[in-house]
Amino acid sequence: MTTIGNANITRRRSWGIDAPSETASRWAIVLAGGNGSRMRPFIENWLGEPRPKQYCTFVGTRSMLKHTVDRAAELVPPKQIITIIGKGHRSFLETEHTPLPGKVIEQPKDCGTAVGIFVPLSYIMAEDPEATVLVLPSDHFVFPEGAFLSHALGGCMLARAHEDSLILFGALATRPETDYGWILPSSSKRTIVTGGALWTTRTVKRFHEKPGHDEATELLAKGYLWNTMIVAGTAKTFWRLGWQLLPQMMERIHNLRQVLRGVGSGGVTSRQEAAALYDVFVGMRSYDFSRDLLQRAAGWTKSVTMDGVEWCDWGRPERVAATLKQLELRPAFPPQMANSIGQDPEEFRIPQWTSHNSLAQRT
């Protein structure tokens, strides 16, 4: 195992809540297939090219993708990280200072986030069907990182304790955001002890995707959370729900899994593997993980609220600028660009934190 892997395992064991056997069966899927159309004009003006936002460094020296992969490497063995990228995105990986750990899958075309999750999951099912899986979108800002990692680790352990459920992470809503999905947790809580720590979950009662401003204001007042699309679950639970709710999608992905089993035994060549991956996408319609699966699986979904964590989907330049201004962090892009965005930062106000040092040191 690499040095970073050893360092991370030592840190987790020092917390007293992560046994080696649990870590060995844990995997992460990093979603990096989007093209970020809403950020494109800002990035083109800044960098002179249509670079998807996950490959951009907005603060410090690491791209959003590298931040996400580094967080994943704190929780799972680095070789058990699978990153799925968009068609033509490999050239952007060349600008990363170090190669990404684990496996990188390039999609022949974008077929939505459900396909983006279940294709990497087929690789996990072929190699480790007893795995616990953490899904991490690569365009999220979280702070402080240590608090987020604690929640993420807890979510993985809860997924193992609730083997028939998915664990969905909700962020405390602070404004009537119309670009986000929202979730309403039930009023009843279930508290369990796992991994030597106390965790609280609530069943998800209702999902609501991208409301209008007035409706979002109402959801905020009713105590809805933002749906972060960060999800933990056992590989078998993901797979079962996929077959139950999206059988047409799963038929194609199941064929890929069958081929991948042959790869492990040496009976299938890399060319055959690539052909099987390509076949998944030929004629495949688009499936959205939140809309087409999570919303229909509310009865099998439990929410964990990320208390003490500031979360933001950096899908608009206004959010990026407002976050960096609020945390008093120097942007990697010219400061005058932030001033020219023209969005009132009060609309995107985030909580004041007492210390910025931990984030600044790790950027």
Image: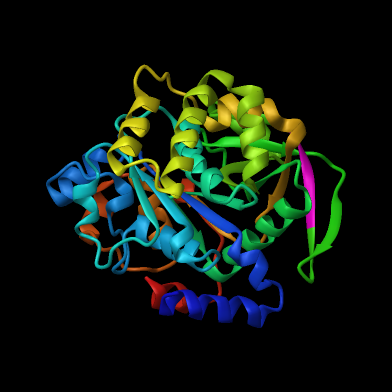
Viewer-proximal residue among 143 and 173? 143
Q: Nearer the viewer, residue 163 or 265?
A: 265
Find residue 342 and report its horizontal and vertical position in percent: 30, 44
Res. 166 image quadrant:
top right
**Residue at x-position 66% and y-position 31%:** 241
Q: Quick check: can you spot residue 306?
A: yes
Residue 217 occupies which quadrant of the picture?
A: top right
Q: Position of residue 268 (x, y in %)?
A: 37, 40
Decide which of 214, 165 is in the foreground and name it: 165
Q: Quadrant of the C terminus?
A: bottom left
Residue 215 is at least partly visible in this image: no
Is 336 magenta? The answer is: no
When the figure is inspected, residue 349 is found, relative to residue 299, above or below; the finding is below
Circle count? 0
Residue occupying the point 56% across, 71% down: 146
Q: Is residue 98 above or below residue 129?
A: below
Q: x, y (%) of residue 41?
A: 22, 39
| Region rendered in magenta | 200-206
Instruction: Name the chief secondary structure element in magenta.
Output: strand
Whether 269 is drawn above or below 357: the answer is: above
Left-right relation of 61 to 199: left
Residue 46 percent coordinates (x, y) = 17, 50
